[in-house]
Image (cartoon, grey):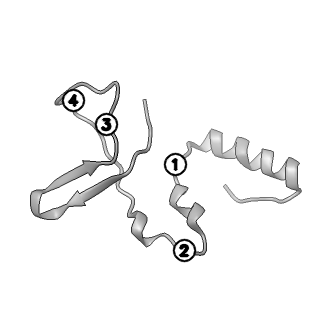
């Protein structure tokens, strides 16, 4: 299972404060976490916050759909 949620890092407490509960995750479960600093995303390109959130196959499907719908090639 994989999903993306927002969290705030509290450095003085060495804690990630989640924006929402992790439904379906047991208490004290060990998890792998990927860190992306959302505060550094460009204001002129807010969609860049989503970079890396899709696996390669899903990204190719979306790229094909964009090309078919708008005639615009996008890089995956």
Mark 4, secondary structure of its residue? loop
Please tell me the numbered disc located at residue 53. Answer: 1
Q: Is residue 18 above or below residue 11?
A: above
Give the spatial CA distance, label 1 vs label 2: 19 Å
Residue 11, quarter of picture: bottom left
Q: CA distance from mark 4 to mark 2?
A: 35 Å
Question: Measuring 13% from the left and 56% from the top, which residue is drawn there?
Answer: 14
Residue at figure coordinates x 71%, y 45% from the top left: 62
* Neighbourhood count class around disc 4 (C-alpha, 10 Å): few under 14, some 14–19, many 20 upward: few
Residue drawn at point x = 79 percent, y = 51 percent: 66
Mark 3 and mark 2 lie on one chain; the one further toward the N terminus is 3
Q: Secondary structure at mark 1?
A: loop
Q: Do callouts 3 and 2 mark residues in contact (Cβ within 8 Å)?
A: no
Q: Which residue is mark 3?
A: 21
Whole-number angstrom distance, CA of label 3 to CA of label 4: 13 Å
Q: Nearer the viewer, residue 36 or 56?
A: 36
Question: Of label 1 and label 3, which has the lower sequence position?
Answer: 3
- Which residue position holds label 4? 29
Q: Give the Cα distance between marks 3 and 2.
A: 28 Å
Query: How many C-alpha atoms fall within 10 Å of the one at disc 2: few (<14), some, or many (≥20)?
Result: few
Give the labeled residue for mark 2: 43
Farthest front residue in view: 20
């Amino acid at each position: 299972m994989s999903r993306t949620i927002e969290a705030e890092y509290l450095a003085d407490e060495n804690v990630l404060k989640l924006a929402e509960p992790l439904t379906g995750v047991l208490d004290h479960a060990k998890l792998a976490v990927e860190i992306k600093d959302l505060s550094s995303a460009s204001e002129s390109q807010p969609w860049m916050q989503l970079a890396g959130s899709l696996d390669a196959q899903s990204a190719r499907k979306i790229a094909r759909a964009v090309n078919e719908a708008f005639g615009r090639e996008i890089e995956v």
